[in-house]
Image (tube, rainbow, N blue to C red):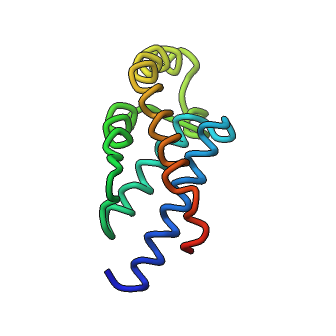
Amino acid sequence: MNELDTLKRNRLIKKLRSNAIAITTHQIDMHSGFFKMNYLSGRIEDIRALEDLDLSIFRKYYLEIQSHPVGQERQLYSKDFLERLDRKLKAVDEKYRDLLYRKCLEIIEKYKDIKDLC
């Protein structure tokens, strides 16, 4: 990996950690936050996979919620339709919530010194 890729990867890891903090402190909506985690983890993997850290939980969760509207996109749907979707989404959230939050805490701890690498 060249120096530019290393710098880019470290910046993405820093963003991944910042997003993990935002999720665990409820500064960002859970669904939007995990959409972003999936995106960032994919960009990191494009450069080089993280050692000793499996981020596949973000992809698994994303695959189950990707068809559900999140954020401002929800304004485009009727209240009744959203209520039906939200019941399904709630079940998926319950299935993954603890695993996702534990993974965020792991990222926060593992990369606490990332600011020194960027």
- Classify residue 85 by image quadrant: top left
x and y percent of residue 5 in the render? Answer: 39, 79
Residue nearest the observer in this picture, 98 or 33: 98
Query: Would residue 45 be found to the left or right of residue 112 on screen?
Result: left
x and y percent of residue 31 in the render? Answer: 52, 36
- Classify residue 96 by image quadrant: top left
Residue nearest the observer in this picture, 113 or 95: 113
Q: Is residue 68 above or below residue 115?
A: above
Query: Would residue 58 be found to the left or right of residue 18 on screen?
Result: left
x and y percent of residue 103 in the render? Answer: 45, 39
Residue nearest the observer in this picture, 67 or 109: 109
Residue nearest the observer in this picture, 72 or 60: 60
Quadrant that contains the C terminus: bottom right
For image coordinates 35% across by 50% down, the residue present is 53
Q: Is residue 7 above or below residue 17?
A: below
x and y percent of residue 79 in the render? Answer: 58, 19
For image coordinates 49% across by 64% down, the residue present is 12
For image coordinates 31% across by 67% down, the residue present is 48
- Classify residue 39 by image quadrant: bottom left
Quadrant that contains the N terminus: bottom left
Query: Would residue 49 be found to the left or right of residue 8 on screen?
Result: left
Q: Is residue 41 above or below residue 84?
A: below
Q: Is residue 45 above or below residue 26?
A: below
